[in-house]
Image (tube, rainbow, N blue to C red):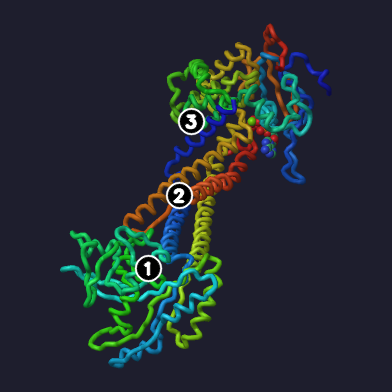
């Protein structure tokens, strides 16, 4: 597959993406067996499927946290599967925002400091971003908790900090692996409303979930099975955005 | 851009150390002890060798000192035999013969007699040294007031004397010594000068082999006067019995042209003297050799210190590495989060390295402070000279910094090499 075959307005495109875990000579786990997926800018995609079908593996590859064993992955126009470790870190820091099931906040840091972590690795002066961090905290409704520590917050509040953190570098894509898995349905809804708002603001979102109600919010639902895409359901069309193609600077 | 990142990483390191204050301090202890022991021990060693060297230098590094000593076999007899007279030691003729040694500049004979020196009610036990006018040129000495002995004094066997500054103070607390005469045994001697031996003004007399004369309480009189007034045979009373010794000269100091001459002259002197001394009744002291020995001792002393310091710093380093490895395990999840949020491997390395370097440099700083204070206290309480050299501080500090980097590198690498996903999953 060459770059010319790529969809012109795809933010994310995988071609024959494979991931194989070699645990022993006889024990090889093929977690992904050739996934072709294209996600256009501004779309909201949910990935569903039974446990062990490779959803998290897929999301980790999309998030550049791991490297595929085969196939290629284009983020914008760049072939991410060929990048070295430093370049991948760069991509994670600048283009991708993560929201994890278990929040993954740093326990020693305050809410504000947790939101600032991605900025630290961009080498910017944190003082220039104070206003932006407060704005984000206001967005997730935690502007009065900036100097609290994660263990002083409820699960929903912690996940909202994680949402704010995922936004601080103004990423192109937000990847969320079961973001509401640890939350009750009400707080879960609050977090999902937040994600909806981000999508309406133009962010591309890929979200893994087991919950049909969660998947309903997405434009498209991808169903996975045994490391492959089983079927795809389109809920709604992706709204037209004035600038549909992704320009790499 | 890098600047902010670096400052941020350093702040992060310090913050995480402050989070575990006790642990950080305990980790630093190894380095603190290592550094402070290096500095303190080097300061003590340096001070001790300085003292030794000063003492030796005072004897004159160009000099060879020959002392009369009582032959060993006969010292037992004198105690039991009443009125026995021993005849030993250096003679005037020895002095004349030593002039012929190649490279010998001056040969200074001395008679050293212990007597009480009196002025009015004051009485001080002294060494009465009969010697020649060029004494100050051979043994470093300042004439503080008046003059030293002169050729005329020698020629006419004058009853004049020169006293050391300390003695002058003790004998003449209120009077001007130069206006008066002191009484030694039966005779009066006019004080013509006050001297101070150079570089050793404040030192107290000490007993010891390489010691020349005690530094205080010396009275110098012309050699000829000493012979005439005290005679060649000296009586000694001890516990009811008395003994008599006939000693012409108690000491001859041979001043050589230079240090190289000193080395060749020592065996030659022995050769010359042995022809006329069949008993072992003299000894030679070569300050230069003592100086060399002192330096060699210092070198091996420093070597021992160095190994002790190296071991304690090594132990300190291992302590740091141990804690950092534990800290990496404890913070695996955090490392995973940071990697997911854009941290490169080198950011993680820097973060952990900053912590170890801060630990070791912090420990080094405390160690330097304590290490400088300890010698100061030792000097204050024991009066021993201690010298804190800049190089020992630089050495200790440099090593502690190096220890931090060397022992911090492995845990830091281990942290950076963690797989981001594995690290994120870590519980
Ligand atoms: N590090 C790994 N080593 C070996 N096998 C792995 C590893 N990570 C995942 N797998 C395997 O890959 C397959 C897909 O795992 P993945 O975590 O992607 O599933 P999932 O769809 O997210 O499941 P769930 O809904 O339970 O989270 C599973 O069979 C799993 O055992
Ligand atoms: Mg999963």
Which residue is pictured at 69% across the width and 14% down the height?
A: A41
Q: Quadrant of residue A102?
A: top right
Tell me: residue B424, above or below residue B139.
Answer: above
Query: Which quarter of the figure is the N terminus of chain A placed in?
Result: top right
Which residue is pictured at 75% across the width and 41% down the height?
A: A28
Query: Which quarter of the figure is the C terminus of chain A placed in?
Result: top right
Pinpoint residue B76: horizontal percent, then vertical percent. Answer: 35, 89
Pinpoint residue B165: horizontal percent, then vertical percent. Answer: 29, 61
Q: Which mark is residue B32?
A: 2
Q: CA distance from mark 3 to mark 1?
A: 84 Å
Tell which subunit mark 3 falls on.
Answer: A
| Residue toward you, B288 or A243 | B288
Tell me the residue that label 3 is attached to.
A109
User: Is the CB of the residue bearing disc 3 within 8 angstroms of ligand 2?
Assistant: no
- Find numbered disc 1 in the image and state the secondary structure of the residue it sits on: loop
Q: Are marks 2 and 1 in contact (CB under 8 Å)?
A: no
Tell which subunit mark 1 falls on.
Answer: B
Pinpoint residue B147: horizontal percent, then vertical percent. Answer: 32, 62
* Horizontal relation, residue B339 to residue B119: left or right: right
> Do pointers 3 and 1 mark residues of a single chain?
no
Answer few, some or many: residues within 10 Å of disc 2's Cα (few below 14, many 20 plus, some between 14 and 19).
many
Q: Which mark is residue B133?
A: 1
């Amino acid at each position: 597959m060459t770059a010319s075959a790529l969809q012109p307005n795809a933010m994310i495109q995988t071609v024959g993406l494979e991931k194989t875990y070699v645990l022993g000579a006889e024990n090889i786990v093929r977690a992904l067996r050739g996934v072709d997926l294209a996600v256009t800018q501004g779309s909201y995609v949910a990935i569903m499927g039974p446990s062990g079908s490779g959803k998290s593996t897929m999301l980790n590859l999309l998030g550049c946290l791991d490297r595929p064993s085969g196939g290629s992955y284009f983020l914008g126009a760049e072939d991410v599967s060929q990048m070295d470790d430093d370049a991948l870190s760069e991509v994670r820091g600048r283009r991708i925002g993560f929201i994890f099931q278990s929040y993954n906040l740093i326990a020693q840091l305050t809410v504000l400091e947790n939101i600032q972590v991605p900025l630290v690795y961009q080498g910017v002066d944190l003082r220039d971003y104070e206003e932006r961090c407060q704005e984000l905290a206001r967005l997730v409704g935690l502007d009065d908790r900036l100097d609290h520590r994660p263990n002083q917050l409820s699960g929903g509040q912690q996940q909202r900090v994680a949402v704010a953190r995922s936004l601080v570098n103004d990423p192109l894509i937000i990847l969320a692996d079961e973001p509401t898995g640890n939350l009750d349905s009400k707080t879960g809804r609050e977090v999902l409303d937040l994600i909806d708002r981000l999508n309406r603001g133009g962010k591309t979102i890929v979200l893994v979930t087991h919950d049909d109600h969660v998947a309903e919010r997405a434009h498209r639902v991808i169903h996975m099975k045994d490391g492959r895409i089983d079927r795809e359901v389109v809920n709604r069309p992706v709204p037209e955005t004035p600038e549909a193609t992704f320009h790499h600077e | 851009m890098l600047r902010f990142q670096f400052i941020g990483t350093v702040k992060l390191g310090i913050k995480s150390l402050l989070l575990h204050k006790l642990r950080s301090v305990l980790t630093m202890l190894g380095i603190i002890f290592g550094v402070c022991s290096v500095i303190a021990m080097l300061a003590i060693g340096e001070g001790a060798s300085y003292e030794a060297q000063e003492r030796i230098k005072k004897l004159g590094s160009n000099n060879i000192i020959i002392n009369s000593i009582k032959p060993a076999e006969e010292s037992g007899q004198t105690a039991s035999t009443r009125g026995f007279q021993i005849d030993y030691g250096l003679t005037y003729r020895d002095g004349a013969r030593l002039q012929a040694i190649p490279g010998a500049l001056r040969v200074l004979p001395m008679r050293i007699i212990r007597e009480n020196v009196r002025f009015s009610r004051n009485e001080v036990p002294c060494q009465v040294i009969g010697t020649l006018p060029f004494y100050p040129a051979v043994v470093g000495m300042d004439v503080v007031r008046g003059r030293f002995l002169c050729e005329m004094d020698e020629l006419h066997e004058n009853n004049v004397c020169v006293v050391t500054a300390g003695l002058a103070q003790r004998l003449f607390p209120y009077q001007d010594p130069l206006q008066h005469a002191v009484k030694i045994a039966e005779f009066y001697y006019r004080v013509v000068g006050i001297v101070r031996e150079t570089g050793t003004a404040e030192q107290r007399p000490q007993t010891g082999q390489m010691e020349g004369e005690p530094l205080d309480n010396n009275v110098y009189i012309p050699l000829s006067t000493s012979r005439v007034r005290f005679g060649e045979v000296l009586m000694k009373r001890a516990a009811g019995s008395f003994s008599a010794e006939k000693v012409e000269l108690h000491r001859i100091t041979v001043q050589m042209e230079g240090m190289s001459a000193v080395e060749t002259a020592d065996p030659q002197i022995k050769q010359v003297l042995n022809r006329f001394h069949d008993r072992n009744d003299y000894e030679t002291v070569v300050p230069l050799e003592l100086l060399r020995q002192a330096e060699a001792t210092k070198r091996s002393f420093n070597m021992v210190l160095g190994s002790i310091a190296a071991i304690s710093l090594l132990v300190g380093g291992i302590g740091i590495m141990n804690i950092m490895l534990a800290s990496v395990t404890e913070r695996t999840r955090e490392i995973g989060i940071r990697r997911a949020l854009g941290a490169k491997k080198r950011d993680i390395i820097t973060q952990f390295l900053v912590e170890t370097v801060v630990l070791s440099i912090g420990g080094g700083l405390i160690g330097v402070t304590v290490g400088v204070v300890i010698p100061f206290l030792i000097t204050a309480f024991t009066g021993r000279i201690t010298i804190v050299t800049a190089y020992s501080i630089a050495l200790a500090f440099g090593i502690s910094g190096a220890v931090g980097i060397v022992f911090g590198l492995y845990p830091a690498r281990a942290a950076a090499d963690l797989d981001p996903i594995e690290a994120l999953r870590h519980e």
